[in-house]
Amino acid sequence: MQSLSEQEQIRRQSLQSIRDLGIDPYPAALYPVNTYAKDIQSNFNQAPENYKEVCLAGRLMSRRVMGKASFAEIMDSSGRIQIYINRDEICPTDNKALYNSVFKKLLDIGDFIGVKGYVFITQVGEISVHVRELTILSKSLRPLPIVKKDEEGNIYDAFNDPEKRYRMRYVDLVVNEQVKDTFVKRTKMVNAIRNFLNKNGALEVDTPVLQSIPGGAAARPFITHHNALDIPLYLRIANELYLKRLIVGGFDWVYEFSKNFRNEGMDRTHNPEFTVLEFYVAYKDYFWMMETTEQLLEKVCIAVHGKPEVQVGDKTISFKAPYERISIHDAILKYTGIDVSNMDENQLKDVCKKLHIETDNSMGKGKLIDEIFSEKCEKNFIHPTFIIDYPVEMSPLTKKHRNKEGLVERFELMINGKEIANAYSELNDPIDQYERFIDQMQLSEKGDDEAMLIDHDFLRALEYGMPPTSGIGFGIDRLAMLMTNNQSIQEVLFFPQMRPEK
RNA sequence: GAUUCCGUAGCUCAGCCGGUAGAGCAAUACACUUUUAAUGUAUGGGUCCUGGGUUCGAAUCCCAGCGGGAUCACCA
């Protein structure tokens, strides 16, 4: 055990002193909370008669002692409220230990306390709780970083070291109000999505995280080993192929919030584990999916922000449907002036050279077009825009375009220059699917280590017949970043991956 | 993985022309019955990320390592 700092030692001594006074610093009994700080703050003025006997609990966040009377602040899950404590009221007998020793000395900032009393307004006009009874609910043994704000809103002693904040998210949440807000918004967003899907008849399902063939996406998987079966297993990189099996099985609309795992780089938009919402709907195509996506996102934005707009950095992004649609070829034409629609691989490589985009031999036609798009176009799409009709080579699970040779029925939704969703008319022709897997194998042999593996069971499922289906995947973390105006994925994950502490 | 910046008290930071560590808040003690980040007075608190090197002497200069941020590469 590490040696304790002075402040930690003092808190441990205080803990013992509390016990010595016969007070349990970690009582077991239920504490009958009947109101919250925010409730009092927002409703006391309208209905003061409802706040004559309040009981609330939370952390002690500040303390201003003035002899026999003190003001302090208590913070619960809803916010903060000031409390007023008078020695002779909480210590009606001659024994003044609860005030003089416990409250003034043995309690520390961060301790959980419960108070019973009534609400009143101080001479300076602050709604406060006049305490009649004070109870220790849990002692805190480590000093909490105290973040303070002055009248102009200047922040002092911010707890803002990203490493400490992420490693000790519990502390971050206690002291940084806006962090809590981010995660509440994230949950509102997820709930809004779930409500939308459930209301429309979708069925939420669970599919395997441990897979023997990691399919449905192009990515490097985490590998693990199952002892009893003595086989390698992979943490899923996507759940797509399983959800499609369920469509084969006869469900019309299934969805899953899928925690996916990819053994790749980490940065401010990538965490090794991340959440994707995928859903698959029978008898639909990608046009239908675009309309559904617009409706969904407009509703989600309203659920989180009360309006279909969101402020992201210095931009206001509107989620109001409908969204613009542009083909990937037209997007490239628009931002580079080059028409790539009829080019072969060598011509595309020349284009890349001209645009100063690096290429290598493993890149096929689809990958080259994708590179040009990512380099030159992607960043320009700030408002939600559907990029449609991708080359067949980079979409091995997508149905061929109904009337455009060499393309597939696929769209990606770009917002604020980033891909937020990816959707297609799903490939349900098992023979075509088999050939696409074979193409992937050839890419793999060319050196593309992310090319997909053949999944024979999935092919078998398709052979039994899958109805025409449209599917989509949403990057939930990235959507959360947009909806909460955060630039880093670590800000929208409670516990982002970090190197272990030594 | 590459480049770059950073790592000093519980928190935020100063000190970095090398001379053995400082402020504010937090803590401790005393005083004070209505205060608003911030009452007054006093006090304590640091393997200056780790390990080497240069030097009479290193928080400071050099090298290596560890951890983190940012940018880039890969990817969602």
Image: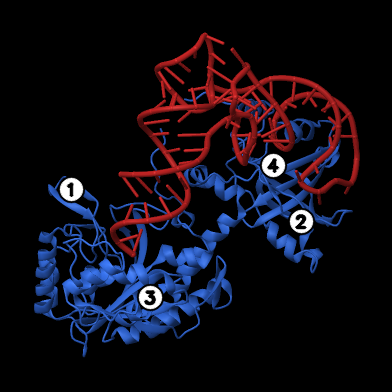
Chain colours: A blue, B red
Residue underneath mark 3: A413
Numbered disc 4: what chain? A
Give the residue displayed 89% in from the left and 53% down from the top.
A123
Are tags 1 and 4 found on a single chain? Answer: yes
**Residue A6 position (above or below residue A308):** above
Circle 1: residue type = His
Does label 4 or label 2 sit earlier along the sequence? 2
Residue A256 seen in the current view:
no
Estimate the x, y position of residue A78 in percent, counting from the top left. 64, 57
Cα–Cα gap, marks 2 and 3: 53 Å
Residue A410 or residue B58, whichever sits in front: B58
Q: Is residue A196 left or right of residue B15?
A: left
In this rendering, the count of numbered labels is 4
Q: Nearer the viewer, mark 1 or mark 4?
A: 1
Cα–Cα gap, marks 3 and 4: 54 Å
Does label 1 or label 4 sit earlier along the sequence? 4
Residue underneath mark 4: A135
Q: Which mark is residue A183?
A: none
**Residue A106 position (above or below residue A48):** above
Q: Secondary structure at mark 4?
A: strand
Q: Are marks 3 and 4 in contact (CB under 8 Å)?
A: no
Residue underneath mark 2: A53
Q: Are marks 2 and 3 in contact (CB under 8 Å)?
A: no
Residue underneath mark 1: A226
Circle 4: residue type = Thr
Q: Are marks 4 and 2 in contact (CB under 8 Å)?
A: no
Are tags 2 and 3 found on a single chain? Answer: yes
Q: Are marks 3 and 1 in contact (CB under 8 Å)?
A: no
Q: Secondary structure at mark 2?
A: loop
